[in-house]
Image (cartoon, grey):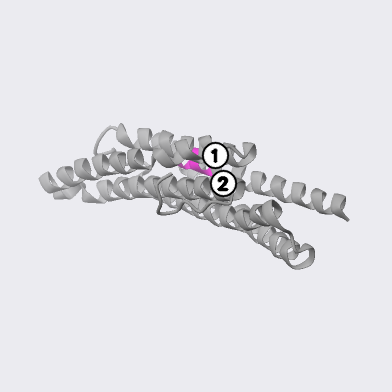
Amino acid sequence: MERHFDEELKDLNLLILKMASVAEEAIFKSVEALRRQDKKLAEEVIGSDKIIDDLELEIDERCIDLLATKQPMAKDLRFITTGIRITTDLERIADLAVDIAERAEELVDQPLVKPLIDIPKLAVLAQEMVKGALDSFVKRDIDLARNVRNRDDEADHLRDLVQKELIEIVSQDGSKAPRSIPLLLVARHLERICDHATNIAEDVVYMVEGMVIKHRPF
């Protein structure tokens, strides 16, 4: 019975990692769609959303079944409950990637109001934070989780730089607003992805140490 339970936990872990891989790819493709003004790539991201939704439902069902039938204790209980929370964040990350892809579609065949400088920096940061958070989950490494959490202020700073510059552009020439607003939203979407990566990192600390660090110094 115990061996069967261990196999079920391994299968659950693999499902979470599969969902994580799809979400990471969605972030990358959405930003590339914006950078290259590639409508086809944006459509691929939008189409991948159902895969994420289906994986979230499957993982939730497995977690609930394990909680109900196995009555896990200690670290196994923390792993399963953390799995539920992580998949929620991954689903939201994928939704934000879809939002970015939709903004990219709005800008296809339109000249950008400014060179993309800080948005790509924020995109790289978002991808690094998501990867770091997921690596901390795979390795059960709270130092990696701490590093992700410590970069959240950097994401806020880059978002603020983008907002300030775009608001200044629109204030000088209101006709540029339709091309500025999508970029403003992209910056916000990327910063929110960083927030969800931070959530995952905090959940990893709980899973490994049994310590809740949300809203607390760590």
Note whether residue 37 is visible: no
Say which residue appears at 33% left-offset and 50% top-offset.
185
Q: Name the residue under label 1.
A: 142
Q: Which amino acid does label 2 sit on?
A: Val
Report x, y in % for residue 96: 45, 51
Report whether 122 appears left or right of 180. Answer: right
- Residue drawn at x 47%, y 39% as measured from the top left: 146
Q: In the figure, is residue 117 to the left or right of 146?
A: left
Whichever of callouts 1 and 2 sits on the residue coming sooner in the sequence is 1
Say which residue appears at 72% left-offset and 60% top-offset: 62
Q: Mark 2 points at which residue?
A: 204
Q: How crowded is mark 1: few (under 14 residues within 10 Å), some or many (20 or more)?
A: many
Q: Quadrant of the N terminus?
A: bottom right
Counting from the top left corner in percent of width and height, residue 215 is at 40, 54
Q: What is the span of residues highlighted in magenta in the rendered image?
A: 26-30
Q: Is mark 1 on a helix, strand or loop?
A: helix
